[in-house]
Image (tube, rainbow, N blue to C red):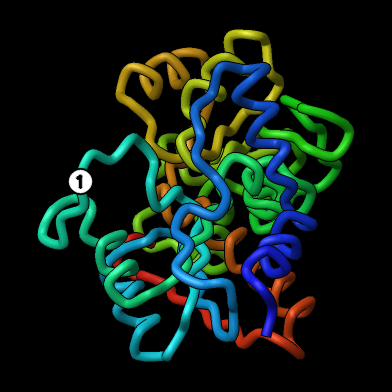
Amino acid sequence: MYSLQEFFGVLDGIAPIKYSVMQIEQEGAYDNSGILVKMHDRVNRALFSLDLSTFAVERAKRLKCDSVVTHHPAIYLPVKALDITGDTAAVALAVKYGMNVISMHLNLDVAKGGIDDSLYAGLGGKECRFLNGLDEFAHYGREFKVDKTLAEFKKHINKELGSQKTLVYGKPNAKTGVVASFCGGGAEFALSYARGGGAADTIVTSDMPHHVLKELTERGKQVIILTHYASENYGFKRFFEAVKEKVFDKVETVYFEDEKFL
């Protein structure tokens, strides 16, 4: 067993919360990472889930977990009331069941070995160049080489990331030489990269508005759009494995994957 703060210290050691603070202060980003629900001061068994959904909380209860760790903030905007039937249902349910909830969001996106770094690894990239850095260890956006046709690249992505809803804009037999990837909703970063003369012929991200897709294709870019979940679940599972290795003798850990979002 760990105390809640000891357990959070392990998470913070892998993805320092200071990186969320730095993005808020330097880039004007918004985040809400850290211990968001504290119901007790112990962690015996923790469930990891990309989102705090009612499905995840119910799974945690069935598995007798006392804590839940998410990537997306369980509480993102100010909450005026908890309603177990409304949009705060998952948080209300976690409170009802007496569960701690910890969220590791922007800090985990940019940390070494974090979500964005893992996406690059899952895409099979070589010779990585970092695009947006907070310091020497924390970056968002990667540019790298991939020697495949677009059809081959899609097949690799679907297999490695478990993606089932990958969208591809470009000719299947076209070559991918240089790829730029951005985990999560990185469309605006991708657009800024392209406008700045980025060398990639292929862009990989998720949550892309049509006007961004239109401009990228008009600039001659091939575009691969993942679901938000698929672009981040792969990295969150790697984070889970890293935590599991560090706490295995004191805390049991389990992973919840919601396949309908892949």
| Res. 136 image quadrant | top right
User: Residue 162 at x, y = what percent?
Assistant: 48, 68
Name the secondary structure under disc 1: loop
User: On the rendered structure, is 82 left or right of 247?
Assistant: left
**Residue furthest toward the top?**
196
User: Residue 43 at x, y = what percent?
Assistant: 59, 78
Q: Residue at x 76, y 41 (%)?
A: 145
Q: How many marks?
A: 1
User: On the rendered structure, is 178 left or right of 164?
Assistant: right
Q: Residue at x 64, y 48 (%)?
A: 108
Q: Residue at x 47, y 68 (%)?
A: 100
Q: Is residue 183 visible?
A: yes
**Residue that badge 1 annotates:** 81
| Res. 128 image quadrant | top right
**Residue furthest toward the front?**
40
| Res. 46 image quadrant | bottom right
User: Residue 39 at x, y = what percent?
Assistant: 44, 68
- Is residue 210 shown above or below 72? above
Q: In this orientation, which residue lies closer to the viewer: 230 or 68?
A: 68
Q: In this orientation, which residue lies closer to the viewer: 144 or 254?
A: 254
Q: Residue at x 30, y 24 (%)?
A: 210
What residue type is disc 1 on?
A: Ala
**Residue furthest toward the left?**
85
User: Residue 91 at x, y = what percent?
Assistant: 31, 59
Look at the image and tell me in which quarter the C terminus lies: bottom left
Look at the image and tell me in which quarter the N terminus lies: bottom right
- Is residue 51 shown above or below 97? above
